[in-house]
Image (cartoon, helix red, strand yellow):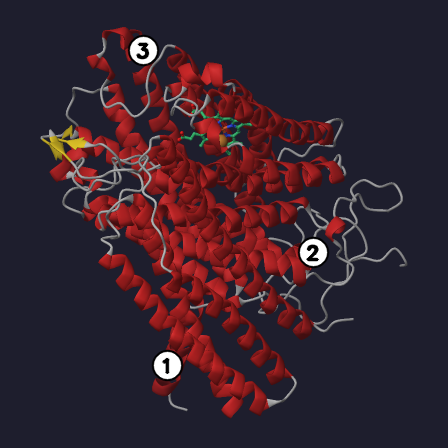
Amino acid sequence: MKSYNDKNIIAVKFIVWLFILSSVMLFAGITSAYIVNRIGLLNANKWIYIQLPNVFICSNILLIISSITIYYANYLFNEYKYLYSKTLLIITFFIGIFFLILQLNGLKYLINNNIYLSGNVAGSYIYNIYYTWSTCYIWSFRYLLLLFFYTTK
Amino acid sequence: MDRQTDNILSNNKFNMKILKYIFSRDHKIIAKQFLITAMFMGFIGLFISVLFRLQLAYPNRPFYIFKLFFNKFANDGYLDPSFYLSLVTIHGTIMIFFVLTGGLSGTFSNLLIPLQIGARDMASPFLNMLSYWLFLLSSLTMLYSFFVITGPASAGWTIYPPLSALPKAINGSGTGQTVWLISMSIFIISSLIGNINYITTIMNMRTQGLTMYRLPIIIWALLLTAILGLLSFPVLMAAVILLILDRGFGTSFYLSDIFLAGEYLHYDGGSPILFQHLFWFLGHPEVYIVILPALGISSEILSINCRKPLFGYHTMIYSLIAIAGLSFFVWAHHMFISGINPLIGSVFTITTLIIAVPSAIKVFNYIATIWRGNIKFTTPMLFTIGLISFFITGGLTGIYLGNAILDINLNDTYFVVAHFHIVMGSAAIFGMFAGIYHWYPKLFQKMMNEKLGHIHFWITYISIYLIFFPMHFMGINGMPRRYYDFNAFGMFNIFINMNKFITIISIISGFAQLIFLYNFTYSMFKGKDSSKNPWKANTLEWTTPIEHIHGNWENDLPVVYRWPYEYSNPKYQDDYMPQNISDKH
Ligand code: HEM
Ligand SMILES: [Cu+2]
């Protein structure tokens, strides 16, 4: 029989999953807007193809790698291997910095090619993803600092 | 201790008590906060509707009351046409979001979930408190729009672009619309936080023996409501984000090829239809977010007041699940005339007609529950019967509207106004009234006055049919909704007197709500004391002490042995058998 407090701890984890689910729906909303809008404009021959620079692919790969490193940092932390955990956290941190540099490069590319938020909708969607990314980015830094704080304690 | 310090101390205690009340994390107090905020908003929404009904009935007559309340929008007592649109918009927004979403699910989820599943509080009392405060903040923000110089938003509760996307389009498109969007963003966050908490609590905090198939139907309904909100409100948020970018940052998500006052605007490539898709992807589930808690409430009250087990408990759950699931696949029935592909129109006609099936199953189950029951005509029971009546009448017109061919003619007429005011407005409000009358003893330890309750019911019930039934015929005759002055069109002259009649009845029914308000506040202080289980019900909330305590149960949490609808079983001595009493003794 689970105690009342155990139940509560499980519940708090559940809350996090539901938060993730609702953010997935937020992105799903924007993505489906993109798809519908694109189909409409393609039919009207108004869609502008934007060749995304390769830096965005690189930064995507970094994003995935950093998820893996932070996941293991958390895993090792729970196994009480604080030193390994901290090393992975530092690696994640530098990946994060590198990611930022690549993203800013991507932004520079967009601006150099006259793609602005308020231009053709095709460009607006890129910026849209760009901004939402940045917000998540800032949030995840907070998480990173928190973990770092716990490993050093 | 001398007297003075004693006084100060007790004074302090009093202050502490007030503070505790305001910043409470106790779910029972948060439920009261939701209820009272929603009632406040509800009365404002009701008052607004009486005002624009006056305009509809007597379009060319000045009214002092317009001048009194909205001086700058009512020159010499003549209502400003653009302000009429603002009134309609804010009325719809308040009623749908603040009363029937925040108020209905907010109040009863908070009150009933922990009490009926045997938990000491919500999974996260802090998030729960946050959810209420954001709700209050967004309510106040919405009301603030009346103090904006150009007036509140006026693109309707559905805020279709381009009216909502071009700040210079009409008066209400300016600051008023911005305030609306800010308020709605806060509201969305509040409701997401709340919903996450409700789902988590139901899934994880049930007491021993309380399996999913022993839950009261209302808990199932509140669970599905929360899931619907969790999945659909973020999509509205996405729509709102894109709208904000269009308004302030020059993007063209929803705009294309537009002239404003003869001037060509630079917007290119977007589509207002895109907004409609995003909006109704929330909007249709939203109407079920509104009605499901009401249906849940009525299931409880029916069974208790018929002293009979709820008919078809399992089918009831499955149809709730079916309604919730299907509600994500019918949204385009609001868009039949938007120029969508007719093939898509047919697909959505079919899904729309399918969703009527589980709705009908619920109604049949209700009627079968009443059938040969030992009916107690208490006030909550009357309101529940009213709800079923409205759900049938309004649901039937939904099937008319779901047919694309018919809807092309009926869309944007008073027929739609009649449909949704009966099926959503009235049915859900009746669910809320029923819930308030029924759980008032749990909320305030007192009973509400039955006689006043009956008067309140009969006036309101009859008025609603008198007000909304004629609107079907107006709609079939082509009368469009959201118009300021029908006397400008000769063809609607036949309805001049009908419009006056509707307005007079709506004023009467508006005053009838004061009876409720009086009963509500009076009973809080002078009402008859409630016993521990005044309705002789089976569910766990009636096993807690009458006086509220933090943590709900004094000692151990109750253990559950059976489903909640064990009424009039000859096996037992009483005609009811609470869930927490074991067969063994
Ligand atoms: C039997 C099931 C139902 C069917 C088939 C149905 C069908 C429809 C259709 C086709 C429309 C669009 C009419 C138009 O704009 O031309 C509509 C409008 C509406 N329905 Fe229903 N409906 C049903 C039940 C409900 C329920 C249960 C609610 C709420 C509790 C509801 C609330 C609304 C609202 C609010 C609108 C108007 C939205 C607006 O344009 O402002 N309906 N319904
Ligand atoms: Cu709908």
Can you give x and y, in whole percent of width and height, for residue B492 in the image? Answer: 28, 10
Query: Does residue B109 appear in this view?
Result: yes
The mark that comes first in sequence, 3 or 1, is 1
Q: Quadrant of the N terminus of chain B?
A: bottom left
Can you give x and y, in whole percent of width and height, for residue B150 in the image? Answer: 15, 42
Q: Which mark is residue B360?
A: none
Q: Are marks 3 and 1 in contact (CB under 8 Å)?
A: no
Q: Nearer the viewer, mark 2 or mark 3?
A: 3
Query: Does residue B145 appear in this view?
Result: no
The chain identifier of the residue carrying mark 1 reads: B
Amino acid type of the residue that numbered disc 2 sits on in the rendered structure: Leu
Is the CB of mark 3 within 8 Å of ligand 1?
no
Q: Quadrant of residue A6?
A: bottom right
Q: Are marks 1 and 2 in contact (CB under 8 Å)?
A: no
| Residue at x 65% of width, y 27% of height | B357
Amino acid type of the residue that numbered disc 1 sits on in the rendered structure: Asn
Q: Secondary structure at mark 1?
A: helix
Q: Secondary structure at mark 3?
A: helix
- According to the picture, the residue beneath numbered tag 2 turns out to be B540
Q: Nearer the viewer, mark 1 or mark 2?
A: 2
Amino acid type of the residue that numbered disc 3 sits on in the rendered structure: Phe
Q: Is residue B298 above or below residue B136?
A: above
- According to the picture, the residue beneath numbered tag 3 turns out to be B495
| Residue at x 40% of width, y 55% of height | B135
Task: Using residue A82 as the reference point, say whether residue A57 is left or right of it.
Answer: left
> How far apart are the alpha carbons under marks 1 and 2?
40 Å
The chain identifier of the residue carrying mark 3 reads: B
Q: Quadrant of residue B399?
A: top right
> How far apart are the alpha carbons under marks 3 and 1?
66 Å
Q: Nearer the viewer, residue B31 or B244?
A: B244
Q: Are marks 2 and 3 in contact (CB under 8 Å)?
A: no
Q: Which mark is residue B7?
A: 1
